[in-house]
Image: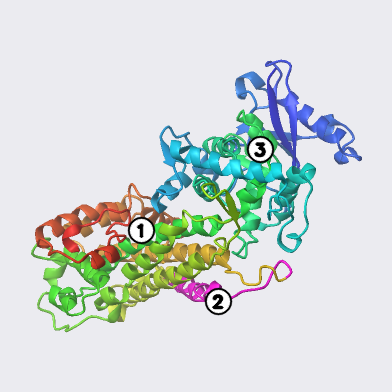
Amino acid sequence: MPRYTVHVRGEWLAVPCLSATNTMEWLGKEAVRRYMKNKPDNGGFASVEEVKFYIRRCKGLGLLDLDDTVGDALEDNEFVEVVIEGDIMSPDFIPSQPEGVHLYSKYREPEEYISLDGNSLTTEDLVNLGKGLYKIKLTPEAEIKVKQSREVIERIVKEQTVVYGITTGFGKFARTVIPNSNLRELQVNLVRSHSAGVGKPLTPERSRMLLALRINVLAKGYSGISLETLEQVIEAFNASCLPYIPEKGTVGASGDLAPLSHLALGLIGEGKMWSPKSGWADAKYVLEAHGLKPITLKPKEGLALINGTQMITSLGCEAVERAAAIARQADIIAALTLEVLKGTTRAFDTDIHAVRPHRGQAEVAFRFRSLLDSDHHPSEIAESHRFCDRVQDAYTMRCCPQVKTDFYTFHFVGIFFFIDVKNMNWMVFAEREETISGGNFHGEYPAKALDYLAIGVHELAAISERRIERLCNPSLSELPAFLVTEGGLNSGFMIAHCTAAALVSENKALCHPSSVDSLSTSAATEDHVSMGGWAARKALRVIEHVEQVLAIELLAACQGIEFLRPLRTTTPLEKVYDLVRSVVRPWIKDRFMAPDIEAAHRLLVEQRVSVWEVAKPYIEKYRREHIPESRPISPTAFSLLRMSADDGHGHRHQNEL
């Protein structure tokens, strides 16, 4: 007998259906009837017949025809929502879908797997797991280590040894011994009481990353979790069953307790959960719809699931990957602006940067040459001002290599995240048959790194905003004011520049380090904390603002080219221009600008059709033709540089080392 899960006014109801010929209207009325039955005042209705409603799918929010039969319109155990006409949505209502539902309705279950052993996961792997590109399985070696550590826990329980978190309470209650009959309840109570976060839920991508990273550290075999429970967690990940995890509530020491507790709460079948099939619903219904059972926690397993810095680290990995991507593209956009403003390439001469041999500085100058070298890529725009009387350019163009210090920023930050994707606390050493409670849950490392990352990447927007000003200011650009004809009647890029300025100003406040703060918690047991959760969230906000500012500069530079036609720029920059024009048409007169900025923003964040992917072949071709064979370098120098990647994904160019 088919059954459907129906959402009515914030409640989820399981509605069995005896016949597939029943209509959608019948399903809606039956759900409303059950809803009224559970309410002392019948939910404010005199009868089911007076209730006017419509029904939509939870997946994709598509409206359903009330005259269709359930057999024709729905799959077995599908999730639908009854929306009662005249209802005003409560601000506390959990929507049936998170923001960006149009993206998740296209979700396709992956076929490929990543094997986790707790040691080999990279930041790029984690981001791809967040995007739903892979499922997870354990390596055989990881399974053995997990079993061995669990045997230590079972022995402790059997021998009734007093060990923190297994046979005692937590935090201030560490000296309270718990009888064996209550050990399972202890773990469930831990998860329930610590699920105290607030704020919007993490997006499905970020929830996947958090869950995947927790699986990764559990796969190391030091947590004491049972293989059976870990496999249930993996099954939930592979089905994309993602618990409701509020983004706020962690102080980043004793791990990310609140968000990881919400993660565990969904896995034990309590709280809310999301999947592409169901949207938001009660966790027990979502798990059941995917043929999964809620986890029954054994001794120590609640603690194993919640004690770590995986929220800080997973969000931090996303920040590192996105920052590296926008930093690469910032060079291309700046080169395009320099061309439009008829700047000189002499400031990027090889010998200048050899005198001050910072590798990142040399790389930025190299990219400018690869895009603007008139001997390699003839430019009609550059040729048009070859004999002008201008001696040098403003710092925002001339000093791009010296200002853009992301090589050192990403190297510094990358070291921490290379290590912390494998980090965990509360160690069970099977070979020593011993458990040790340490302090690896403290998030100071990633918190400091993310504060530094935010400061480093912010400068890309700060210098970009100044270039936007130069493009829009006719006294500096020799272009029409605000890059539009019939100025006065049209305002052009006037307010787009204001938006960029507002974002840069906001970033200045967001770049104040969160890791300089600490508040004592848990009755002074946890008396120094990292505030790494806020460091991670604000770093992502800074990066998003940087992406948006550079999107505005990209649009402005392409609009500037319109006023230099029929002259053409270099081949790689013409390709960038063509990419932008494939999604945003030239600005002839004023129109709604926000969609154009969003379209340009997508070109900077989507990997397959990004600005970087268009320009990269020309940069690499120039590299092969102009960089000589490298000289040998010392092992020390190599170890310093080996984690750095020209494209941010581990593809190194040995001839540059």
The residue singled out by tag 2 in the image is 516
Q: Amino acid at mark 1?
A: Ala
Q: Closer to the camera, 447 or 197?
A: 447
Whether residue 499 sits left or right of residue 484 in the image: it is: right
Residue under label 1: 325
The amino acid marked with disc number 3 is Ile
Magenta-colored stretch includes residue 397: no
**As drawn, is 240 to the left or to the right of 181?**
left
In the rendered image, the vertical position of residue 391 relative to residue 273, given as above or below: below
C-alpha span from label 1 to label 3: 38 Å
Quarter of the image containing the C terminus? bottom left
Position of residue 432 in the picture relative to residue 192 (left or right): left
Q: CA distance from mark 1 to mark 2?
A: 28 Å
**Residue name at image x 81 percent, y 35 percent:** 35
Relative to 539, is 262 above or below? above
Residue at the location (66% across, 68% down)? Answer: 526
* Residue 3 on image: x %, y %: 70, 24
| Residue assigned mark 3 | 295
Report x, y in % for residue 159. Answer: 70, 44
Q: Where are the magenta residues, as a range?
A: 497-523
Q: Earlier in the sequence, mark 1 or mark 3?
A: 3
Q: Position of residue 387 (x, y in %)?
A: 9, 78
Near mark 3 (Cα within 10 A), the count class, few <14, some 14-19 or many ≥20, is some
Q: Residue at x 29, y 66 (%)?
A: 640
- The residues tagged by marks 3 and 2 sit, at their Cα atoms, a distance apart of 38 Å
Classified by dominant secondary structure, the portion drawn in magenta counts as helix
| Badge 1 vs badge 3, beta-carbon distance below 8 Å | no
Q: Secondary structure at mark 1?
A: helix
Q: What residue is shown at x 33% (from left), y 70% (from top)?
A: 408
